[in-house]
Amino acid sequence: MKDAVSVSEYSSLFKYLVANETDALWGLTVTTVGYHRMTVVKNYPPKDHPTEYNFDYAKGRILNEFQMVYITRGTGSFRTASTPLQHVREGDMLLIFPGEWHTYRPDPKTGWDEYWIGFKGPIADNLLKNNFFRKTNPRYYMGISEEVVALYNKAIDAAEEERAGFQQFMAGIVSHLLSILYFNHRNRQFADKEIINRINKAKIIMQENIFNSVSPEEIAEQLNLSYSWFRRAFKEYTGFAPAKYMSELKLQKAKALLVTTKKSIKEISISLNFDNVEYFSTFFKKMTGKPPMEYRTDSTRFTEMQ
């Protein structure tokens, strides 16, 4: 690990790592981790990094890995091949993508404190491929998070010690950071508490009416919302369309009734407001891969074996 430089204007601590073939089999390996703290910007990035990581702000650079750069103090600027020049503030997380030209730097008037971690592997590639993260949206506002800083510091400590399994430990930290990043991004659009309250109210109505016949349109009407807006907001927040969410609730209740009661398939079908037992059986098999009676038999057998 590079020794920390403790001066009033600049301090730094970082390491560049190697991963063996066994580490790569884990699916995610860490390439670099560290931090810079600078109140006065003379050269950025500092010239004590490997050649492939150094860059000139005007020319930028392209990496063959992902990086998460977290700014905890100060301001600056950021630009990529897919996005225009953006203002960076404390609390921002910059997500760098492999093969994507980019450049960034702190404002000379403020400097900044930054943490970063670099990583690569099929797990990260799959997140990009499936649009969990997009090159057109590389800047995320996280706020100042003690939890996020603690994770970076754990990764720095692990890199410094390089104990057996440290790459796998650090891969877990990267996965945690990515999940926090994704979670915060998905929920920032629902910062309006009134929207969250209405969606939660809709979920309660669905749960309370699991044995009754109520449609998503009727729920939207009860909440004084247009159905098109309600359906879109509900799906964005929960990941389910309202009708699908209600089906999942009925499925879970049907499973519980099959396992914990002696009610007949017909009785369960009627209680859950299915049109007829045949439709219920078709629905249940489509959702679980098993007819209701087979599910009951298998679940009872499994319970008896415990």
Image (cartoon, rainbow, N blue to C red):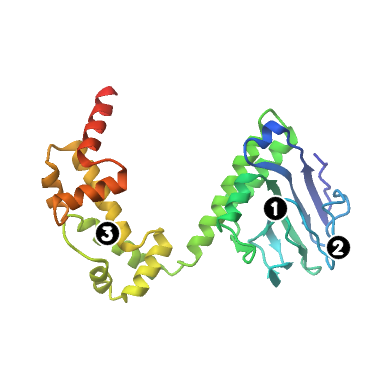
Badge 3: how crowded within 10 Å, few (<14), some, or many (20+)? few
Which residue does the image show at 39% across and 63% down from the upper left? Answer: 235
Q: Residue 138, how many percent across, how many down?
A: 64, 63
100, 184: nearer the viewer: 100
Label whose residue precedes the other's in the sequence (2 or 1) = 2
The answer for how far apart the CA atoms under marks 3 and 1 are is 40 Å
Which residue does the image show at 17% across and 55% down from the upper left? Answer: 274
Which residue bears the numbered disc 2?
56
227, 188: nearer the viewer: 227
160, 202: nearer the viewer: 202
The image quadrant that residue 37 belongs to is: bottom right
149 vs 43, left or right, is left
Which residue bears the numbered disc 3?
204
Q: The residue under label 2 is which amino acid type?
A: Asp
- Picture quarter with the C terminus: top left
The answer for how far apart the CA atoms under marks 2 and 3 are is 55 Å
Query: Which-is-in-front pick, marks 3 and 1?
Result: 1
In this rendering, is residue 163 above or below 136?
Answer: above
125 vs 218, left or right, is right
68, 273: nearer the viewer: 273
**Tag 2 secondary structure:** loop
Q: The residue under label 1 is which amino acid type?
A: Gln
Which residue does the image show at 79% across and 61% down from the upper left? Answer: 39
Badge 1: how crowded within 10 Å, few (<14), some, or many (20+)? many
Residue 11, which numbered label? Answer: none
Which residue bears the numbered disc 1?
67
